[in-house]
Amino acid sequence: MFATISVAAWDLPTMSAGLVDVDATAIVQFGFFIALVLVLPKLVFEPLLSRFEQREARTDGARADARRMLKEADAQVAVYEKAMADEKQTALAERAAARNAAQKEANALIAKVRAETNSKIDAGIAALRGEADKARGAIEAEAGQIAALITAKIVGGQA
């Protein structure tokens, strides 16, 4: 299949420089080097670099997405906290209004009971005064009878 080319068949001059011999294999190696310089960037380096760039873009994109999501979360937390503060203020206002209404109702009930109690006390005092006046009248009448009886006994000489 492959033809074997002998370097000796090319009749290239060889130079000897001590440790390194420059001969026809150097030309073959230079050919491989040029081929690799032309082929490797297209087959290996460019795809590898594009993969690195894609990975970097994805990483940066993920970081940007994470930053964006954090900002959105912070915004949502701020909205939530504001809503909670508003609801708390509303609840406090409703509680204060309910407390005021209950206090007014209690004050009205106390005033009503106080008025009823005062009227019952006044009626009781009036009734007691009436009974006291009747008792005084009865005592005065009885006192008059006793006085007349005592006078009659003293005047009549009965001792």
Image (tube, rainbow, N blue to C red):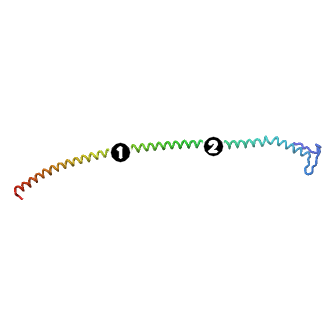
133 vs 10, left or right, is left
Residue tagged 2: 67
Please report the residue visible at 68 percent of the width from the left and 43 percent of the height from the top. 60
> Which of the 4 quarters of the picture holds residue 152?
bottom left
Nearer the N terminus, badge 1 or badge 2? 2
154 vs 82, left or right, is left
Please report the residue visible at 89 percent of the width from the left and 42 percent of the height from the top. 3
Quarter placement of the C terminus: bottom left
Q: Secondary structure at mark 1?
A: helix
Residue tagged 1: 107
Quarter placement of the N terminus: top right
Name the spot of residue 54 as percent of width and height, x first.
71, 41
Please report the residue visible at 35 percent of the width from the left and 45 percent of the height from the top. 107
Q: Answer few, some or many: residues within 10 Å of disc 1's Cα (few below 14, many 20 plus, some between 14 and 19).
A: few
Q: Secondary structure at mark 2?
A: helix
Please report the residue visible at 8 percent of the width from the left and 54 percent of the height from the top. 151
**Farthest-out residue, bottom:** 159
Name the spot of residue 132 as percent of width and height, x first.
19, 50
